[in-house]
Image (cartoon, helix red, strand yellow):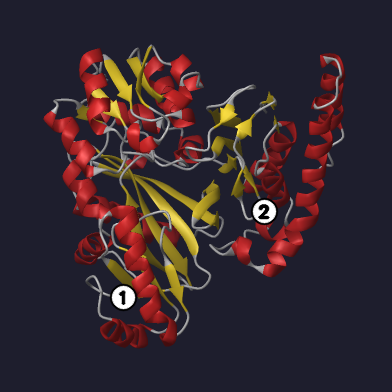
Amino acid sequence: MTYFEKILVANRGEVAIRVMRACRETGIGTVAIYSEADRNALHVRYADEALSVGPAPSAKSYLNIERILDVAVKTGAEAVHPGYGFLAENPVFAKACDEADVVFIGPSWKTIEAMGSKIGSKRLMQSAGVPVLPGTPDGIDDPEAAQEIAREIGYPVIVKASAGGGGIGMQIVEDEPALAGAIEATQRHAASSFGDPTVMLEKYLVKPRHIEVQVFGDDHGHTVHLFERECSIQRRHQKLVEESPCPIMTPELRERMTASAVAAARACDYVNAGTVEFLYADGEYYFMEMNTRLQVEHTITELVTGVDIVRQQLAVAAGDPFEFGQDDLAIRGHAIECRINAEDPLNNFQATPGKILRYRSPGGPGVRLDSGVHQGYSISPYYDSMISKLCTWGMSRDKAIERMRRAISEYVILGVKTTLPLHYALMVNRHFVAGETHTHFLSEPHIQKSLLPALREEEARMQTLASSLRQPKEVAAISAALGAYLGTRPPG
């Protein structure tokens, strides 16, 4: 396969390390960029070269297109991998890479631009025969016209920014009196967050599942899918737990949904890795959006298919065709990913930046941990709160859940509150174990009530263990406390 000589990774943390690992396997040199807040970060140490791109605020560093490309040119990097977040889905950055004669490892800037507009992408999907949610075909600014459309499709409806993502600025409207205010508020949010005040209106599904399909295209006319992922457990429209395959998937539904995903990719001439996201309810699925980048949860697709998605990204960007066809791909077993964030789940998921005083990674059969932190590392308030991605694999969903319980029991992060206790509570929750999830799962009062006992128990265990670090004890005593903690965890 063809590869580059040197790649700049325009990101930080665990995703930067993930990309660099693929580069190291293939003999590609790596260039890291960092803000002054990340001078001693793990991704900086892992790279072959590392250069600062500015002060801590991301607008002056990780979003500084001119500075990033200046580093790429000066270091002789032939290509840039954007990871996810920051500039990964920014068509201006992708185009600037082209103009600087630096390969952007991802789809073309034209594809990113086309799929970045919810209105434009929805039109394109309709023309490709992909099911879409009932709603406005164009942007809306007239409350009276919006009310007419809302009456036609039925309440509740959702108002969202056309250029947005990640749930930012979305407004769920239950009845007609609230619609005009929701449109106005979303327009303001869209203008300030994305520089585009255009908003759209769609039918709101009350308890849908969020199911996405990994797609991949090369420059030789091949487009394949790597099956689906279930991403329904979320907070504030941000995913917390993902799994592959989807627990309720049937062969017939998979055939239809993956065919729609491939059609979506072909409709926008998609090259490299991407994800087509659907909402599923009452036996029907609808196109939601396309993420034109590597996904956080690509790891579980790798676990069940055996495909190194990042390595394939590098080869396709260098001009190679796939080394496999659709008939070569199959699902083997089941994988689960828990996003471990520096957040307090008992305090509305408030971010908890701070120094990690003790860090102990899980391991063993069927466990994968993608992390960008270490003991003594300080979680910065400037960036996303994700610490790591903890994944487990088993021959069945039950086995993957059992392994996740065990892996969480081994994982020690002290000094900051994390979502680990919540994940453990989820893994022992009968509703999750039964696969009874939807996008509002964590908002349901009966679910919250069922999660609280295990969550609080785990919080108490962590606090007891953390207190041992605040006492003037020897290292041996702290190690003994850790050993006792790990040895006395209740089974799932």
Q: Between residue 64 and residue 99, name the one nearer to us.
A: 64
Quadrant location, the C terminus:
top right
| Residue at x 64% of width, y 42% of height | 400
Residue 149 at x, y percent in the picture:
30, 83
Give the quadrant of residue 278. bottom left
| Residue corresponding to mark 2 | 347
Sort mark 1 into few (<14), some (14-19) or many (20+) by Cα contacts within 10 Å.
many
Q: Image check: 40 left or right of 203?
A: right
Say above or below: 143 vs 454: below
Give the quadrant of residue 8. top left
Say above or below: 163 vs 420: below
Q: Is residue 321 visible?
A: no
State how many labels appear.
2
| Residue at x 24% of width, y 24% of height | 79
Which one is closest to the eye, mark 1 or mark 2?
2
Estimate the spatial distance between the alpha carbons at disc 1 and disc 2, rounded to whole Å.
35 Å
Q: Image check: 219 left or right of 386?
A: left
Residue 295 at x, y percent in the picture:
41, 42
Label 2 is placed on what type of residue? Answer: Asn
| Residue at x 69% of width, y 64% of height | 447
| Residue corresponding to mark 1 | 135
Quadrant location, the N terminus:
top left
Q: Between residue 116 and residue 294, name the one nearer to us.
A: 116
Say above or below: 483 vs 262: above
Residue 157 at x, y percent in the picture:
41, 76
| Residue at x 25% of width, y 59% of height | 196
Q: Secondary structure at mark 1?
A: loop
Q: Between residue 221 and residue 15, name the one nearer to us.
A: 15
